[in-house]
Image (cartoon, rainbow, N blue to C red):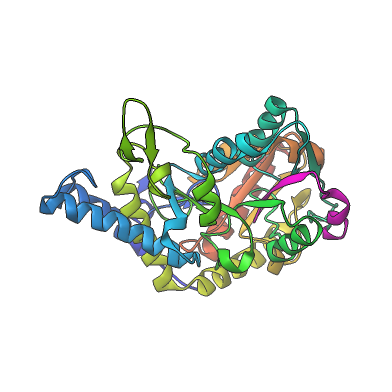
């Protein structure tokens, strides 16, 4: 087990004299001091707009911004840093593809495939595009263990299918989808079908190599991987990005402007209109440095140990039901569950009395909760700063709630 708690200032804080037990990293991770300092250094030492000036401060800011892009590209195994587009978050990354690629390639004859386990960001976007264009959208179902049945994929994909939009890791079930296997099958059945992967829950927690995955687009957020809010990444195959029209229009994403026409810049600049989140990109670069120093294999091992311990402890509670795979190797460090007789919101409120932070609700995955036959669930998620003692506190808090609600 690794112990990095000293690097996270929030964990030093006491509320009403009690420490914080943070178990909501799937929603947003805490930020280490190293990331905060990198962002503070930007604003303190060279907090100038990028690309706009030939003076040293602007050049320094530009270099640091592009250095962050290079760090991210290497971290996810991109062949070319020009394939890395900085956006606000994974949601904007998916919307970028919806608008810039989808509206040019999807029509009433097209089919789009998504899954019932998707975050709304990777479902509502395609649902609305289908409504606007008259395309057909289909949903790949899960089995009772929380897995997608890859054997039926060839029956879902056909010559009309233009896109499969799929999560790498479910933010509710924790299911780790076999993306390499899935992409190979999609391309075998229909080589022209593109695959977009929502990697928001994968990149922070395991080694990701987009070139090896074989997908066409990959989206993730900085704030879930120790970075700041307001920065995210769309990775796309360069030839696709090069063909796509800009998502937003304005400054910096142009090469030449005339009163009669505009010539757009090459990717990724074409998709980064206006002043970008420079501090956010630098903070994300620092987060990448931090994770690389730990080693993603160590991150994954730590979470597997915590998840195994948590499932063992929680499963010993009466009236406890969890959702998703039973095999720790096939799930991430997130456990969504319910205690019979206690609504998830009530449970979260009781836990909050002891500063135990979990999530409750549908977790931006209402169709999945409908599929599971529940209206809400409680969700505890773990990251590199969590310990077995945090899980023990969670179990104690649930026992307290059970006494209060007499279940």
Whether residue 294 is visible? yes
Query: Where, by quadrant of the figure, is residue 315 drawn?
Result: bottom right
Residue at (62, 45) in percent of width and height? 400
Q: Is residue 359 magenta?
A: no
From the top left corner, tell me how far across and down residue 10 is, in percent: 36, 51
Q: Is residue 197 left or right of residue 87?
A: right
Question: Considering only vertical position in the picture, is 257 above or below 232?
Answer: above
Residue at (44, 67) in percent of width and height? 74
Can you say which quadrant of the picture contains the C terminus?
A: top right
Whether residue 37 is visible? no
Query: Where, by quadrant of the figure, is residue 174 drawn?
Result: bottom right
From the top left corner, tell me how far across and down residue 77 is, in percent: 50, 67
Residue at (72, 51) in percent of width and height? 193
The magenta segment:
150-169
Q: Is residue 168 magenta?
A: yes
Between 187 and 377, which is closer to the camera in this rendering?
A: 187
Between 45 and 248, which is closer to the camera in this rendering?
A: 248
> Which residue lies most toward the front here?
260
Question: Considering only vertical position in the picture, is 104 above or below 63?
Answer: above
From the top left corner, tell me how far across and down residue 298 is, in percent: 51, 74
Between 168 and 304, which is closer to the camera in this rendering?
A: 168
From the top left corner, tell me how far across and down residue 211 is, in percent: 57, 66
């Amino acid at each position: 087990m690794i112990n990095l708690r000293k690097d996270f200032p929030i964990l030093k804080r006491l509320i009403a004299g009690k420490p914080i037990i943070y178990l909501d990293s799937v929603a947003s991770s805490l930020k280490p001091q190293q990331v905060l300092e990198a962002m503070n250094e930007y604003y303190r030492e060279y907090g100038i707009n990028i690309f706009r000036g030939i003076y040293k401060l602007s050049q320094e800011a530009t270099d640091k911004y592009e250095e962050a892009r290079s760090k991210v590209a290497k971290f996810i195994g991109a062949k070319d840093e020009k394939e890395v587009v900085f956006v606000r978050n994974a949601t904007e990354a998916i919307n970028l593809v919806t608008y810039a690629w989808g509206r040019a390639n999807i029509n009433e004859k097209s089919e789009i495939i998504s899954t019932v386990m998707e975050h709304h960001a990777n479902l509502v976007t395609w649902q609305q595009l289908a409504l606007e264009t008259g395309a057909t959208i289909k949903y790949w179902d899960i089995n009772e263990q929380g897995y997608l049945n890859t054997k039926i994929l060839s029956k879902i994909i056909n010559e009309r299918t233009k896109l499969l939009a799929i999560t790498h890791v479910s933010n509710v079930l924790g299911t780790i989808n076999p993306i390499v296997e899935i992409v190979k099958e999609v391309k075998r059945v229909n080589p022209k079908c593109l695959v977009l992967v929502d990697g928001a829950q994968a990149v922070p927690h395991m080694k990701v190599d987009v070139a090896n995955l074989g997908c066409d687009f990959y989206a993730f957020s900085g704030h879930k991987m120790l970075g700041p809010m307001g920065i995210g990444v769309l990775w796309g195959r360069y030839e696709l990005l090069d063909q796509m029209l800009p998502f937003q229009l304005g400054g910096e994403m142009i090469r030449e402007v005339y009163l009669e026409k505009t010539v757009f810049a090459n990717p990724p600049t074409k998709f980064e209109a206006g002043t970008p989140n420079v501090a956010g990109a630098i903070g994300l670069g620092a987060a990448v440095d931090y994770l690389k120093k730990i080693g993603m294999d160590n991150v994954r091992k730590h979470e597997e140990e915590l998840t195994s311990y948590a499932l063992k402890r929680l499963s010993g509670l009466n009236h406890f039901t969890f959702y998703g795979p039973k095999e720790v190797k096939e799930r991430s460090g997130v456990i969504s569950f319910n205690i019979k007789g206690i609504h998830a919101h009530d449970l979260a409120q009781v836990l909050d009395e002891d500063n135990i932070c979990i999530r409750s609700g549908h977790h931006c995955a209402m169709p999945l909760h409908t599929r599971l036959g529940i209206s809400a669930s409680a969700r505890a998620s773990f990251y590199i700063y969590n310990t077995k003692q945090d899980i023990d506190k969670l179990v104690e808090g649930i026992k307290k709630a059970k006494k209060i609600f007499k279940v």
